[in-house]
Amino acid sequence: ISLDRDRIMVVMGDLQGDGPGAALMVTQAMRTMRRLAAQRADLLDFFARLNDELRVDLVHGCSIGLFAAVLNLPFNSLTCLNVGFHPALLLNSKRHIALQQIHTQGERIGISSGQQFRSSLRPMSLQLQPGDIFALFTDGVARALNPRDLNAGRLSVMGAFAQHQDMPCSMMVAKVLEDAKSHVSGRPSDDICAVALRVKHPQEIPSGAQPV
């Protein structure tokens, strides 16, 4: 989601719940996120307002987990907030820690409201370096790799990203998803999706282009 000329927001999430009402909530959530993002609120305000608007119409027993990251292109900075989703990944073989999980604190959307929800939020900011890869994936990818143990499946996804991190991002994501789908016979039981962004080295950036 484009916030302004210098910032973009990358969002991935899951809805806990079944049936046509749950499917309609996904559509409503996407529409609400785009509207709120156009108002250029910071992540805390964005999530607090998103929670209060969606909670009114959430089907009983449903809640939404989201991971959002705002990328400031001129400053190569990333501000992240996680509300009940699993951690994102930060990969760079040149860093002291080549593979990191990015996790922040926050309740799932729809559990509480108002100040109680807002006070649960703990955003974090990262200074990105050339070669950094930021990646998100759904639990459907992890379940495809290990349907019996979700945490083990997530570790397998991390390993797949690390194995293919020297590829261009589009090819890396395609390879990770290909690996996951190869473990599934028939139609996947959950959404299979992943996204990755790489910070380019200065010599890779054409004049006037963005660093990511």
Image: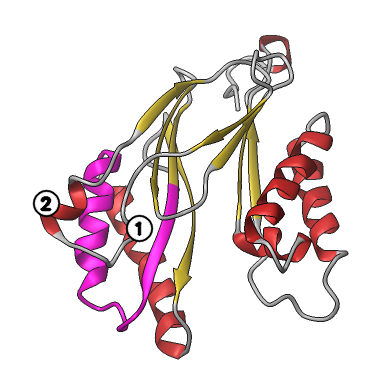
Residue 181 position within the rendered picture, expressed as x and y whole percent measured from the top left: 82, 65
Residue 22 position within the rendered picture, expressed as x and y whole percent measured from the top left: 42, 81
Callout 2: helix, strand or loop? helix
Q: Residue 200 lies in what quarter of the image?
A: top right
Question: Going 79% across and 50% down the picture, which residue do you hit?
Answer: 176
**Which residue type does callout 2 highlight?**
Gln
**Which residue type does callout 1 highlight?**
Met
How many residues crowd around disc 2 within 10 Å: few (fewer than 14), some, or many (20 or more)? few
State which region is magenta: 40-67
Question: What residue occupies the far bottom of the structure in this picture?
Answer: 20
The quarter of the rendered structure image containing the C terminus is: top right
Residue 126 position within the rendered picture, expressed as x and y whole percent measured from the top left: 45, 23
Measured in 3D between alpha carbons, the distance from the residue under mark 1 to the one under mark 2, in whole angstroms, is 20 Å
Residue tagged 1: 33
Question: Going 66% across and 51% down the picture, which residue do you hit?
Answer: 154
The answer to whether one can see residue 40 in this image is: no
The magenta stretch spans residue 51: yes
The answer to the question of whether label 1 and label 2 lie on touching residues, with beta carbons closer than 8 A, is no
Q: Is residue 75 above or below residue 117?
A: above
Query: For this view, does 88 lie left or right of residue 132?
Result: left
**Is 68 or 183 nearer to us in this picture?**
183
